[in-house]
Image: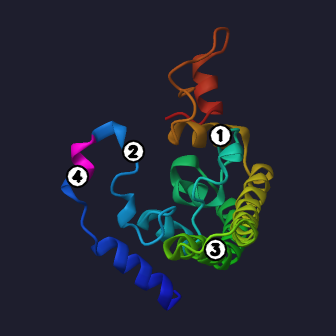
Amino acid sequence: MKPWILCLMLGSSLSMPTLAQHAHGADTPYAGLQNRAIKSLSDQDIEELLRGGGWGLALPAELNGMPGPAHLLKLKDKIGLSEDQARGIQSPFDQMKQAAIPVGERLIAAEAAIEARFASGQVDEASLRRLLAEAEAARTELRFIHLSQHHKTVPLLRPEQIQRDQVLRGYADDPCKNIPAGHNPEKYRRHMGCN
């Protein structure tokens, strides 16, 4: 981890919320955020980016039945991944994480530069456009890194494993509880991997 990132995290986590941020309630949704080292990123955001986590960037894949390697590996026993499947998923996961960490650091640095510019009061349109372009380029690359690995998991999985992942992640109803009309319940449960 870069020393400047650690300093930012420590600085923002040591700052205490003020009484005023609680007194205003819903009218001030940003109250307390002024204590962050980088106003646009929480400590949790920074931690997620530094560990190569998905940061919600792959939701179009995740919520459309293309599970990500990290969650599949975490749920491998509940989904019933074979050793071959787990190995096949581990490789894209390792590649994703290796690529995501430096790009996440780049995004943090870009957001820190925007923060510094506004904190100094030295904002002009040309430099702001450049800084925003740097931040968005990092975000776009990070999003590509995560989304590109999601679509690679689908050919490695059986349809019932994808369905089980969707149920376990809370994205779909449990097919084991809702057997479609006209299906043999015993055969259906076996096919869907129900216990």
SS label for mark 4: helix
Q: Amino acid at mark 3?
A: Ala
Separation (CA) of disc 4 from disc 2: 12 Å
- Residue depicted at 35% across the width and 78% down the height: 11
The residues colored magenta run 20-24
The mark closer to the camera, 2 or 1, is 2
**Residue 97 location, x and y as percent?**
64, 72
Separation (CA) of disc 3 from disc 1: 29 Å
Residue tagged by mark 1?
A: 63
Q: Earlier in the sequence, mark 4 or mark 2?
A: 4
The mark closer to the camera, 4 or 2, is 4
Separation (CA) of disc 1 from disc 4: 38 Å
**Residue 79 location, x and y as percent?**
57, 47
Separation (CA) of disc 2 from disc 1: 27 Å
Residue tagged by mark 4?
A: 20
Quick one: which residue is furthest to the bottom in this view? Answer: 3
**Residue 140 location, x and y as percent?**
75, 61
Q: Amino acid at mark 4?
A: Ala
Residue tagged by mark 2?
A: 29
- Disc 3, disc 4: CB below 8 Å? no
Q: In front here: 5 or 80?
A: 5
